[in-house]
Amino acid sequence: MATKIILDCDPGHDDAVAILLALGAPAHIEVLGLTVVGGNVSLQGTVTNALRVLMLANREEVAVYAGCPRPLVREMVTAEHVHGESGLDTASGELLAVPKTTAREKHAVNYIIDTIRQSESKSVTLVATGPLTNVAAAFAMAPDIVDELKQLVIMGGAFHEPGNITPAAEFNIYVDPHAARSVFESGAAITVFGFDITHQMRITPARLKSIQNNAGRTGKVVADFLDFFNQYDMSKYGWDGAPLHDPCTVAWLIDPTLFEGSQMAVTVDTTDGPNFGRTVADWYAVTEQKPNALVISHGDSDRFFELIIKRLATL
Ligand code: RIB
Ligand code: CA
């Protein structure tokens, strides 16, 4: 039976591929709706991009819900330097078509709460590929949903790898560390994909070419925007491709054999200073802290990209 998901995202190039991968695997994933948060760019931009991606996939019937435009406590931080002004800039300069659809009236946080409450217990999986503001707000407004949720799959954090927005912090956590801390302390069944695994999933030139040539109707458009996405990270890190972070969450739901991890205690540093937004994992269980997350650390990057290309080719 397909896994029912709500995908909370901040599209964003890698969020866009996560959305397309989920839509391209109907035997494994049923997308109940997209909830959107401010992150890579402003909420207005991330909502527009979510609608753009659904239009690209010819799936405009999928509902989009706008959520929190800013973090719970700190000031907003965005990442136009990585994703471009639109949040989904392309190498060709030709942006995805302006969407004809709009977000639904209901707020994303209310949609998350209502959907989980109205669904069979432990039947809904929440996937979060942006800052965790919507998720934290939903858990604070309706603590009962934490135990009703099947699981929460997060792209965020950096454990052995350095941060990308500060030396210590990964962007999704850094934008709203207070939200992230409350989510990791919520008791939800969490699986987390941090940089230790996503940095292994790089969009090399060969993989980009394969997406362009073998991923069907959407392949050329996806390759065009990933070509743009590659530029910042390749120049910053000197790598052979940018890490394709967000689709790791959906790929794991489709084929868990792609990845390996361990249960461990994860905490989020919300103290002012150089470690603000840092995620710390008790890798060797040296504290008394109870493990609160499955931390993914290894994966098969070739099979990961093969899955993405195969599923996008069906759209
Ligand atoms: O740090 C990478 C993460 O932040 C990804 O989810 C990217 O889309 C941004 O949201
Ligand atoms: Ca994201």
Image (cartoon, rainbow, N blue to C red):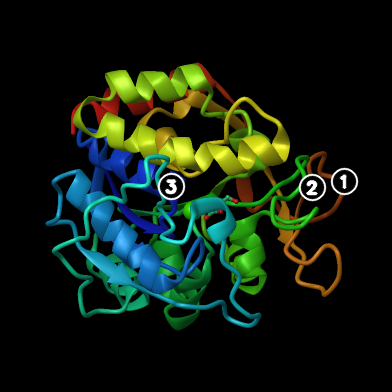
Q: Which one is nearer the viewer's eye here, 50 or 272?
A: 50
- Residue drawn at the location 63% of the way across and 80% of the way down: 75
Position of residue 205 relative to residue 172, above or below, is: above
Q: Which mark is residue 13?
A: 3
Location of residue 185 (image quadrant): bottom right
- Residue drawn at the location 62% of the way across and 28% of the way down: 200
Q: Pick whichever of labels 1 and 3 is earlier in the sequence.
A: 3
Q: Which residue is mark 1?
A: 286
Nearer the camera: disc 1 or disc 3: 3
Secondary element at tag 3:
helix
Q: Which residue is mark 2?
A: 282
Left or right: where does residue 215 sit relative to residue 163?
Answer: left
Q: Which one is nearer the viewer's eye here, 77 or 31?
A: 77
Q: Are marks 1 and 2 in contact (CB under 8 Å)?
A: yes
Left or right: where does residue 137 sit relative to residue 169?
Answer: left
Label 3 near ligand 1 (CB < 8 Å): yes
Residue 185 appears in the figure:
no
Q: What is the x, y in percent for residue 157?
A: 66, 51
Position of residue 28 relative to residue 157, above or below, is: above
Q: Are marks 1 and 3 in contact (CB under 8 Å)?
A: no
Left or right: where does residue 211 sit relative to residue 78?
Answer: left
Secondary element at tag 2:
loop
Residue furthest front as drawn? 93
Spatial separation of the CA atoms under disc 2 and disc 3: 31 Å
Q: Amino acid at mark 1?
A: Val
